[in-house]
Image (tube, helix red, strand yellow):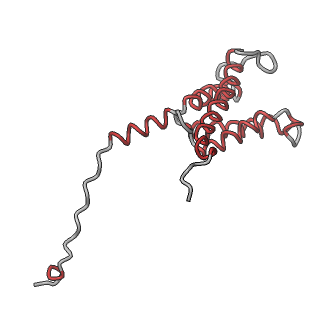
Amino acid sequence: MNSVRHWPDRFGDHAVAAFRIAVGFLFLCHGTTSLWAWPAEPYGGTTAQLGAWPGWWGAIIQVVCGTALIVGLGTRLAALLGSGSMAYAYFWGHQADGALPIQNDGESAALFCWAMFVLIFLGSGSGAVDRLLARRREEATPEPAPATAPDTDPASLVDA
């Protein structure tokens, strides 16, 4: 059997990392646009009002989860929260305007929801803080002592 790894196996972890970073960056940009009108003016021209439901809270989730995804810290949890918030945005914010995302301007919410849903299962990929922390925990954990074999002498099993 050939021991050479095929290129998808060798680079798959890096592709997951690139996907995580791209999705996180785009998600972060949605949040900063809604909160501070940066790097672009928000849809509708106004930023979310402090504490307003759901716009301000959704933007906070986007900024926090987008940043976490970029650095790969708490990737699965950030992806779960981000995916859920986008499902909420789609079903309660877009679907009333039409059944399909192309009809209701919900493509970005649907794509973010599914992209982050996939990251819940794929994890962070290479170059993530999650991986660095896991490696440090492994190095700090002492090796368990070898288990001693129980006394298997047949004479010890008989009551005297």
Please identify the residue farthest to the left as the structure is shown: 160
Q: Is residue 103 left or right of residue 151?
A: right
Q: Is residue 148 left or right of residue 2?
A: left
Q: Is residue 32 above or below residue 95?
A: above
> In which quadrant is the C terminus drawn?
bottom left
Q: Residue at left 62%, top 25%?
A: 63
- In the rendered image, residue 30, in percent from the top left (x then y), is placed at 71, 24
Q: Is residue 83 left or right of residue 1?
A: right
Report the front residue among 96 and 105.
Answer: 105
Q: Residue at left 70%, top 15%?
A: 38
Q: Is residue 110 above or below residue 145?
A: above
Q: Residue at left 58%, top 36%?
A: 78
Quarter residue 154 falls in: bottom left
> In which quadrant is the N terminus drawn?
bottom right
Report the front residue among 130 and 105.
Answer: 130
- In the rendered image, residue 67, in percent from the top left (x then y), is placed at 58, 27
- In the rendered image, residue 151, in percent from the top left (x then y), is placed at 19, 72
